[in-house]
Image (spheres, grey):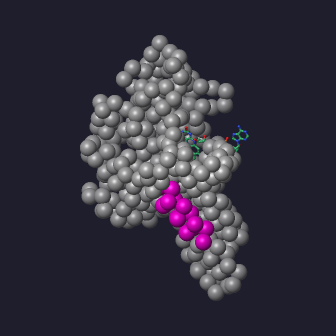
């Protein structure tokens, strides 16, 4: 499908995604139908480099607009789908940046076949994933798409330091589901992956020691998460508008005040997200400037979302907390998805950077 038709096709998918989201949330079920549709529309392979049959969405500067629109639209449809897809893009971005041509070609072939990639880099408290004598032992978690993604890019401790590796998620990996544990983002299907002597071929290692922590990719990739979040914020704003209108509150001054502030929060998030995408994907600015900008964007969008959530709760009252109101789920999903790593240091380091600029 040509690049300009993917956003339009995805936009048409949004109502169906939103309609399915409630049941997926209730059942903590992986969004199979949504990902089948994404495969059929060519969205799964859109992040591949153009040389590999993709559209460079998230992996080439020319694909910036497309990946921004894909991530935001998926967030509008279902934040959990957006989160799973964002991890897929992140994994492919890292493989493309640090993998050998053969590794890139292999991953691309798997994506063209419809495989979804995960990114499992977080260690459960007190645990790590270790590679020794060609075998993996230890755990990763939380892991989105646990039991459903076909491949996962993991970070592993080796004698030489931390390395990235692509693992086939098969029966050799024990998936411990964490059903009922998370308040929101339940359809992202969170779990912990346990490796017990899982063989890891040498050619599964991507890049060299420390590459996962290398800037700018480590920090600037956060722009994709805020793009998905922005989509969730859009859904919240429009759902609140529709519900206020159904109550006939359009002309109530205090409801207008609240909704006007939600629109400001939405536009603030949109402007920061677009600028962060440009810095991360297409800018030649110094690495430290790119990182600081995306870090500020993270906090700006988090703040905008938290403001809008508070306003929606106040505007709609108790019904915002009552199932099956979609606002109830959106508020839970957003609240959980906004919990991204190290928000304090992200803000303070960006502030400190401004003193050295
Ligand atoms: C929906 C969802 C899906 C996820 N899926 C995956 C996945 O598939 N794979 C994966 O690898 N991870 C996944 N994660 C985990 C994610 O990568 C982060 O680990 C997680 O979101 C971190 O959130 P946190 O609030 O625990 O952050 P933390 O970094 O623990 O921050 C919590 C608070 O502590 C403060 N803080 C942090 N460090 C310090 C310190 N040293 N001293 C003082 N204060 C500190 C922070 O500023 C913040 O205020 C997922 C997370 C979510 C929300």
Residue 86 visible = yes
43, 219: nearer the viewer:
219
Residue 213 x/y as whole percent: 53, 35
Q: Which image quarter is the N terminus in?
A: bottom left
For the point 49% across and 47% down, which residue is it? 286
Residue 100 x/y as whole percent: 34, 30
For the point 49% across and 26% down, which residue is it? 209
266 is within the stretch colored magenta: yes
Residue lying at the far top of the rendered structure: 133
Residue 34 x/y as whole percent: 41, 53
Q: Main secondary structure of the magenta part?
A: helix
Ligand 1: image quarter: top right
Residue 182 x/y as whole percent: 63, 45
Tell me: residue 271, above or below residue 251.
above
Residue 74 visible = no
Q: Is residue 121 left or right of residue 107?
A: right
Tell me: residue 318, above or below residue 334.
below
Tell me: residue 235, above or below residue 50.
below
312, 243: nearer the viewer:
312
Q: Which residues are magenta?
A: 264-277
For the point 48% across and 61% down, which residue is it? 274
243 is within the stretch colored magenta: no
328, 213: nearer the viewer:
213
For the point 37% across and 38% down, which residue is it? 96
Question: Residue 16's image quarter?
Answer: bottom left
The total of numbered circles placed on residues is 0
Residue lying at the far bottom of the rendered structure: 251
């Amino acid at each position: 499908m040509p690049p300009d038709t993917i956003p339009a096709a995805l936009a048409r998918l949004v109502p169906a995604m939103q309609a399915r989201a409630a049941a997926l949330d209730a059942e903590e079920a992986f969004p199979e139908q949504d990902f089948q549709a994404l495969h059929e529309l060519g969205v799964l392979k859109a992040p591949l480099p153009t040389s590999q049959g993709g559209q460079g969405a998230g992996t080439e500067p020319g694909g910036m607009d497309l990946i921004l629109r894909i991530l935001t639209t998926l967030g509008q449809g279902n934040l959990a789908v957006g989160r799973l897809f964002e991890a897929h893009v992140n994994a492919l971005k890292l493989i493309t940046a640090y993998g050998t041509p053969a590794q890139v070609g292999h991953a691309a072939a798997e994506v063209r076949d419809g495989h979804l990639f995960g990114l499992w880099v977080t260690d459960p408290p007190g645990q790590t994933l270790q590679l020794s004598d060609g075998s993996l032992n230890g755990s990763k978690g939380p892991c989105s798409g646990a039991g459903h993604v076909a491949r996962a890019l993991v970070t592993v401790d080796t004698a030489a330091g931390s390395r990235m590796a692509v693992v086939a998620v098969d029966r050799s990996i024990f998936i411990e589901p964490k059903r009922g544990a998370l308040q929101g983002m339940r359809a992202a299907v969170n779990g912990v992956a346990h490796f017990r002597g899982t063989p890891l071929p040498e050619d599964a290692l991507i890049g060299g020691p420390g590459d996962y922590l290398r800037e700018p990719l480590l920090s600037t990739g956060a722009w994709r998460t805020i793009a998905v979040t922005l989509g969730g914020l859009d859904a919240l704003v429009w759902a609140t508008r529709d519900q206020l209108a159904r109550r006939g509150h359009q002309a109530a001054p205090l409801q207008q005040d609240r909704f006007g502030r939600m629109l400001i929060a939405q536009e603030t998030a949109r402007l920061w997200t677009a600028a962060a995408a440009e810095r991360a994907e297409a800018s030649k600015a110094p690495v430290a400037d790119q990182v600081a900008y995306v870090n500020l964007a993270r906090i700006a969008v988090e703040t905008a979302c938290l403001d809008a959530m508070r306003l929606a709760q106040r505007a709609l009252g108790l019904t915002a907390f009552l199932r099956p109101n979609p606002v109830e789920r959106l508020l839970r999903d957003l609240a959980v998805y906004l919990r991204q790593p190290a928000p304090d240091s992200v803000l303070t380091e960006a502030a400190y950077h401004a003193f050295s600029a």
